[in-house]
Amino acid sequence: MNKNPHSIMKKFAPLLSLLPLTNALPPPQRIPDILERIKQQQQQEGIQLTQGGASKDSAIISDDDVETLYFHQRLDHFSQEDEGKLVTFQQRYFYTSRYVQSGTDSNNNGGVNEKVLAFLCVGGEGPSMDPSVLVDSVHCTGDMIGLADKLFNEHNYDVHLFALEHRYYGESFPPQKGVGYLRGEGEEDEFQVDYTNLSSRQAVKDIVGFVKSPVALKHLNPSHDSETENTIPWITFGGSYPGMLSAWSHLLHPEAIFAAVSSSAPVQAQLDFSQYNDHVGSDLEDEFVGGSKECHAIVKEGHEQVVELLEGHSLESDGDGDSSEDGVDQVATLFNVCDGAESLRASRRNQEIFVGDGLIMVPAQGNDPSCTGEICNIKGNANDRSWMYQTCSEFGFYQTCNEDSHCPYAKGYHDVSRDLEFCQTAFGIEPDIVKKNIDSTLSYYGGWSLTPNTGEHMGPNNHSSMLENGDDTLHGQERIIFVTGDVDPWTELSFTKGNKDHPSISVHGASHHFWTHKVKDSDSDCVVTARQTIYDTVSDWVGVSTHLLPSAGGEILVRTTE
């Protein structure tokens, strides 16, 4: 006997509500994307920066003054090679002297300006860098470029701007089987990359090697003598993984990096990052960013109903077995699954890939208040495979949806075994080695404690590495500012317990390092205040007095008041 279609629609309303927001299932052989990143917005010509980002005389900024350059970077900083036998690769960087007033001192009287700083935007796993990184991009615009503008215009500082691309990302690929310095043509070449020297430890050394290099010093002082020691302070900026590197480069090498701004940086490596989707569930209820309890219930119950169908029930039968089409067929039809129901029946793993990470993309880490659609889509980028390798060799960060969690998706359809299987299949890294790699990372950098272990560690690919600075690493805890957004799931693993040496800011209503993005009129008061707090904190560190310095208590909650 057929059921009343109206009662069926009512019962499965949460499931059917998901349909307009879902995408078809890609082929079941696809590799699941563990760290979905926001796609870099298309660069617009002649964007005028506002809220602390306008140049002198409110001139419109373009990337015409940004140089794209390369220098020879050491391939393995931990090898014992003789200087004459060092293997190097071409690492890309960007530079502009836009905020350098040539031929004048701080009072514009001629001579050399002694008030000089060097700002470095740290590259990482996000959208590949291009000249816009030093103009207007998701990387370092709202914090680094905005601060450079203020120091230049209001305090007569010369500020040299640099951006350093991360090894194995963008065009900074070491030679690969005769391909040369750059990434080979065709996607198939990515599967032949030797990732032996890809690690955060090498990347931190890259940063230090760059700021100490004659190439960088020539930009700061064209008449630089190789025997002259650099005394210009370097300050690093970065968001997400680059935020980790920004903090760690100063933490481990305070003699080279004067201070660091670390945004949305999950410094606490963790294998099973179940808190990520727990946080997504909370965001779905957060009315400040457009959520509600009803929204959360629809997503949660809709996924529960999909699981019910996959496990043998059907829409029409209401559980009594009277149906011409089983649940798997109905799911495949409802969600337009590629290859139909057979791809879902092929294996439990295919079902997990389909439903375990959610049937809709919730932009919790990339929420943009100016988005006008129902769901602001987040897309991946060309550097995914390099980042996937680093999750296996260093960090984990696997966003699971376990039975005992608060994940709003299909609970039990994404446990960490799936990610460990990927590491073994894609890179030959066994599950127990993945776990050891993560433990080594925590010990090496210190995680939330910010206290590195100065002993010897076996890093990725069994590279032995020794920290060099001993007790100096304690000085590296000074002059780091950590900034997190309370909407961002990555805040769960970020540093949030600040003090006067390394203050922390929690930005209400903000997602993944949103304050580093280009400045918009739609930015909330909290984001604007967070940027100003970064400006004031770093300005104080370099000796510029401001009126809005953080309190000595360390933790600053940037929230709107009613």
Image (cartoon, rainbow, N blue to C red):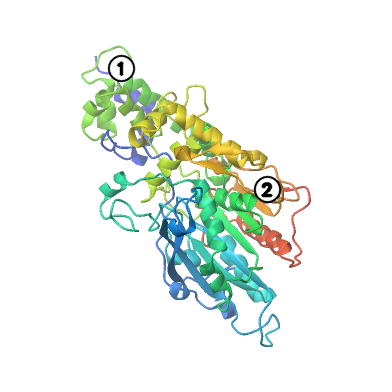
Q: Describe residue 1's horizontal placement relative to residue 404 as left or right.
A: left
- Which sits in the foreground, 458 or 193? 458
Q: Residue at x 60, y 67 (%)?
A: 118
Is residue 268 visible to us here? no
Q: Does 541 appear above or below 400?
A: below
CA neighbours of label 1 inside 10 A, class few (<14), some (14 to 19), many (20+): few
User: Which kind of residue does numbered mark 1 sit on?
Assistant: Gly
Counting from the top left corner in percent of width and height, residue 424 is at 37, 31
Q: Residue at x 40, y 46 (%)?
A: 386
Counting from the top left corner in percent of width and height, residue 480 is at 66, 52
Which residue is identified by label 2? 473
**Mark number for residue 540?**
none
**Mark number for residue 312?**
1
Marks 1/2: CA–CA distance: 58 Å
User: Which kind of residue does numbered mark 2 sit on?
Assistant: Thr
Element class at badge 2: helix
